[in-house]
Amino acid sequence: MTVAHTRDVRRQRRVLGILLAVALAAAVAFCVVGLTGNLEYALRIRLRRVLAMTVVGVAVGYSSVLFQTVTNNRILTPQIMGFDSLFVLVQTLIVYFAGAMTLSSADPRALFVLQAGVMIVFALALHRWLFDRDGRDLYLLVLVGVIFGTLFSSLSSLASRLINPNDFVTLQDSLFASFNSVDESLLAFSTVVLVVLCGLGTRLFRRLDVVSLGRDTAIGLGVDHRSVVNRSLMIVAVLVSVSTALVGPVAFLGVLVANLARQLTRTFRHAVVVPAASLLAVATLTVGQLVLERVLGTDTALSVVVNFGGGLYFIALLVRESTRR
């Protein structure tokens, strides 16, 4: 092990330690700042929201890094490719065909399994049709993502205009990203699913390090590229379902934290980048919610701010990629 490698490892550990400290400090501050009234009840509510932000942050960071690896670029995320919009479409079609009472009274875990299944099928079909070909152009991939997102959003809009107005209100309440009303049973179920998937994904990290070198290189080094990519896409689809089912779509958080994690750690190793992206996402959500509620005193949905900042960062990435050509 060279001196330079040892220095890089120490710096990566230091970065992860700082990110962990920031995330923990933000979580503690969110729980105790402005705590009044029935302290036990208020603290329990805030702890539940912190757990929801942790689950969503880890799911977004984890899925974004894996998706960027299997698509072999640093701009795409599942949200940009229309996964969130597909989830919204499934929710809307359930209300359209069965009514809002079905959506609100059905077992959230059963709905989660249904929606995750649809997204897994979409992910595998997308890989077979688009990502398993040679000569993939970045702008083509972005364009396809925009088309899919627009298609799913348009179908959702059409279906929502045809449903009962009262059902429409119920549907809209479930589609805005908010940590104020998290279903406790779904939160517990999602936490278990997240732990299991993270365990399965961690076993793929070494092979994903090789996959990040490119399809031909990975196959030449003895990695079953198709198997690793398909398994990763299934994990990504379920993780996106976890985050969207809990709080709604957060479109540009993934591209923000995944790229910042790589810039901070300066490595391709998933054992470092994935935890860094997850901690960044958790810290971003917790600090953002703390500032909105305790500093600014507003009930604005955090997703509005995150999507604005992440959207600007996404545009900056596209401009930087175009200047490199």
Image (tube, rainbow, N blue to C red):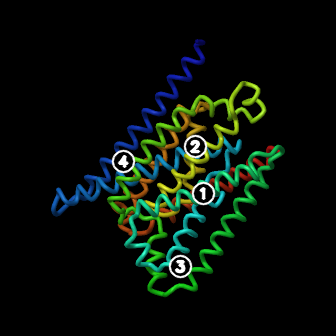
What residue sits 52% from the left and 42% below the top?
277
Residue 107: image x %, image y %? 38, 65
Secondary structure beneath disc 3?
A: helix
Horizontal side of 180 relative to 203 (left or right) equals: left
Give how far apart the Cα atoms at labels 1 and 2 are: 17 Å
Q: Choose mark 3 or mark 2, whichever is in front.
A: 3
| CB contact under 8 Å: marks 1 and 4 | no
Residue 303 vs residue 169, the one in the foreground = 169
Query: Mark 3 = which residue?
Result: 97
What mark, if any, has residue 308 been given in the picture?
Answer: none
- Rounded to the nearest angstrom, the CA distance separating label 1 from label 4 is 25 Å
**What's the distance in space between the residues labelled 3 and 1, CA to CA?**
25 Å
Of marks 1 and 2, which one's residue comes earlier in the chain?
A: 1
The numbered mark at residue 260 is 2
* Residue at x-position 74% and y-position 35%: 214
Where the N terminus falls, by quadrant?
top right
Tag nearer the camera, 4 or 3: 3
The residue nearer to you, when weighing 277 against 236, is: 236
Amino acid on which disc 4 is placed: Ala
Res 103 → quadrant: bottom left
Q: x and y percent of residue 284 in the render?
A: 46, 51
At a point 47% along the width and 27% down the height, the residue shown is 13
Q: Secondary structure at mark 2?
A: helix
**First in residue order: circle 1 vs circle 4:** 4
The residue where tag 1 is placed is: 79
Q: Quadrant of the C terminus?
A: top right
Q: Give the numbered dot on residue 26.
A: 4
